[in-house]
Image: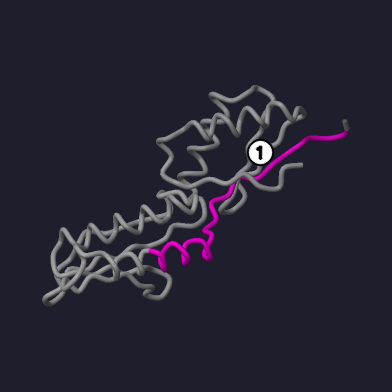
Amino acid sequence: MAGDSSFDIVSKLDKQETDNALNQAVKEVGNRFDFRNVDAGIRWSGEAIEIQANSEERALAVLDVFKEKLIKRGLSLKILDAGEPKASGKLYKIGVNLKEGISQENAKKISKIIREEGPKGVKAQIQGEELRVSSKKRDELQEVIALLKGKEDLDVALQFVNYR
């Protein structure tokens, strides 16, 4: 086999699936009995999502509905960066930002995990908001993917692309 095999580690947001989850949450909030007459709602606010209700507990319940819809659509909850409920007039609002890309800090953490716990012949390079992992053996790349999938303490949703 000539040369190294490689793949990229990225953290991309599937906007269409996120939008579908949001639309399902809107329907459920509109139909559920416990959300009647509490001004509960969830909607896009630019690139972020805004949740509102007349009590802190109801606003958090709407957030839970949205999280449930994300999980059903196969999206990681690590893409969410939800704030605390804030009083805004008679309503409580929660701003939810969506995280995309791997920060330098997280890229260094992932690279360190690969160096310390991964197979010896594997190299990881940070390239902007993604990492390129390469090795002479494809089996070692599979081991790295399995290793990173098993790490629950990473606070970023990872996808493995461009496997060649």
Q: Residue at x 21, y 65 (%)?
A: 33
Residue 124's image quarter? top right
Q: Nearer the viewer, residue 33 or 38?
A: 33
Query: Is 44 situated left or right of 159 in this image?
Result: left
Residue 125 in magenta stretch: no
- Tell whether 159 sits left or right of 82: right
Q: Which colour scheme appears in the figure?
A: one colour
Q: Position of residue 90 (x, y in %)?
A: 11, 75
The secondary structure type at the circle numbered 1 is: strand
Q: Amino acid at mark 1?
A: Val
Q: Position of residue 21 (x, y in %)?
A: 44, 62
Residue visible at 37% across and 52% down in the picture: 68
Quarter of the N terminus within the rendering: top right
From the viewer's perspective, tell me whether residue 85 is left or right of residue 105: left
Residue under the point 22% across and 58% down: 60
Q: How many marks?
A: 1
Residue that lies at the very extreme toward the right in this rendered image = 2
Q: Position of residue 137 (x, y in %)?
A: 76, 27
Dot 1, how many residues are within 10 Å of its Cα: few (below 14), some (14-19), or many (20+)? many
Residue 151 versus residue 57 in the image, above or below? above
Q: Which residue is mark 1?
A: 133
The image shows residue 46 at horizontal and vertical percentages of: 41, 75
User: Which of 136 and 127 lies nearest the eye of the viewer?
Assistant: 136
Quadrant of residue 34 within the rendered picture: bottom left
- Above or below 121: residue 133: below
Residue 9 in magenta? yes
Quadrant for the C terminus, please: top right
For residue 129, side relative to residue 136 (left or right): left
Q: Is residue 144 above or below residue 21?
A: above
Q: Which residues are magenta?
A: 2-24
